[in-house]
Image: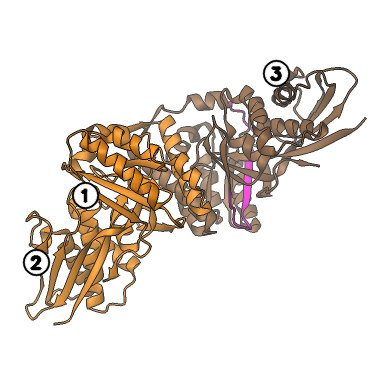
Chain colours: A brown, B orange
Amino acid sequence: MSGIKVFAPASVGNLGIGFDCLGLALEKPGDEVIASKSDTPGLRITQISGAGGKLPYDPEQNTAGVAALRLLEYLGATKQGIELKIQKNMPIGSGMGSSAASAAAAVYAVSELLRTGMSKRELLPFAAKGEQLVSGGIQLDNVATSLLGGIILIRDNATLDVHRLHAPRGLYVALIHPHLELETKSMRGVLKPDVSLQKHIQQSANLASFIVGLFNSDIELLGRSLHDVIIEPQRASFIPGFYEAKEAALKAGALGSSISGAGPAVFALCPNSLIAENAAAGMQAAFAGKGLETTLYLSGINQEGAIVA
Amino acid sequence: MSGIKVFAPASVGNLGIGFDCLGLALEKPGDEVIASKSDTPGLRITQISGAGGKLPYDPEQNTAGVAALRLLEYLGATKQGIELKIQKNMPIGSGMGSSAASAAAAVYAVSELLRTGMSKRELLPFAAKGEQLVSGGIQLDNVATSLLGGIILIRDNATLDVHRLHAPRGLYVALIHPHLELETKSMRGVLKPDVSLQKHIQQSANLASFIVGLFNSDIELLGRSLHDVIIEPQRASFIPGFYEAKEAALKAGALGSSISGAGPAVFALCPNSLIAENAAAGMQAAFAGKGLETTLYLSGINQEGAIVA
């Protein structure tokens, strides 16, 4: 039976300074979804690997399933027999955009399987519906990034006003996942509803300057801009060793370091792969000092997003 | 006696979405400062025109004077006899960067007169000292814009981390000065010290998207991004007719419209000069409906900043 296998990458949401509006796609890791036609009408998830039994097979309870279902409804193809096999290659609840990657992979796989001819931008609203199951609202920072690749700015979630940004060559990310679990929803709950005007100005000027740095390939400006004065201070205490890890990354030459998405994963954005390796070693040692095991991911910036693997 | 005449342009501070971090220079109007050598030691302001007698001749009390004095101190040239003649060509306290233009013109004129060979960026801290006399703190959004020209992003005032942004061709500004006077300092006082996290996200995503629009010459994105949800709602009530004027500008095809600096001047950013003329007519009519007289300035974006005139 014919099938399509799609890879969709992990992503670093927020990038510190772009809370809920910025994301960066990694080359690896990423989730894989195989979509194949079946004689049994309707969508079924027939296999989930790598999730330690934590993800539901009921499509309406699964981000990949919801994303695929909404697309099939749009296509008027809910009677079409389709099987999804999901291979998770990153930890759940880690701040690496795990649910977004599965949702992005699922819609792209189903779209390719049914030869809809739809563009990734046209598929975005359906992937977003899958992600919404986990995040509670329409949050495109991970899902648009995983689907489209690159560095993505979201002007407005409701109207899917998303923009792919120019990214200078050579940037490399060290992403460390310390083995503790945080829930995105509860991590949103710790945030104060207000921000001082002064910090708003500082943070938005940093975000704006980060984008100037991307367009101008001004690596030093990226470094000067990567300071999250709003979200990081409120969430850092939930990640033992965060500040030590960040300090180690900066000492190794990272441009900046902060929490990936809602954490607990921590990223360091680096000017090249060697510095990323050195930053990663320092960060892992910092977490080890707190008795935490870690998983390390080293990656360039993914420029393709979801692809047929 | 040899002299140098310098023109420095008016500027639109904040541009709505970039409070305290964004500015746009106009081709006109602008202030002119003539610096000439004198046999009397020290700096003197010998003429001020166009200010209706409102500006002090004491150099330490005058933005142009302070800017020039700080530069002369840096150069060790305080004994040098210099006369400044200041021609104001825009209203004071209007939100058009009047004091910044005089400060920028003064430092550039003195620098050229003394043939210091200093770049405009090197002159920026001295111009900023002049502007500080009026604004109460280091605020580069007008003064860097007037000195350097173009559209300027300020990442950090303290370290003078300013960036000239790419500006698409053809953009045109309608700037209306309704004849009422507001003080910058008191207009800052009306602002609440806090911003909701939601509005912070919205505003910073808009600022970031505006910059993407500039780099990509995406005119429609500029329009979608030009929505100030933080400052404008707090200051608009001090400008009778503001919302009517803004509505008229948008109806005429302006990309966006908001308060220039701390007001009361109101700008409309337009895709071309014809739309700017139509927007201006609508805005003037709106203010006339409130019994306010207005002065209109129509201008492209100044790409040169301060120049020897």
Residue B301, quarter of the rendered image: bottom left
Q: Which mark is residue A166?
A: none
Q: Which mark is residue A61?
A: 3
Q: Which residue is mark 1?
A: B135
Res B162 → quadrant: bottom left
Q: Label 2 is placed on what type of residue? A: Gln
Tally the marks: 3
Mark whose residue sits in front, 3 or 2: 2
Q: Which residue is drawn at the image coordinates 35% and 52% (left, top)?
A: B23
Q: Residue type at mark 1?
A: Ser
What's the amino acid at mark 3? Answer: Gln
Residue B110 placement, left or right of B14: left
Lateral position of residue A237 relative to residue A162, left or right: left
Q: Picture coordinates of residue A233 (x, y %)?
A: 44, 37
The chain to which mark 1 is attached is: B
Q: Earlier in the sequence, mark 1 or mark 2?
A: 2
| Label 2 element class | strand
Give the residues drawn in magenta, as a range. A165-183
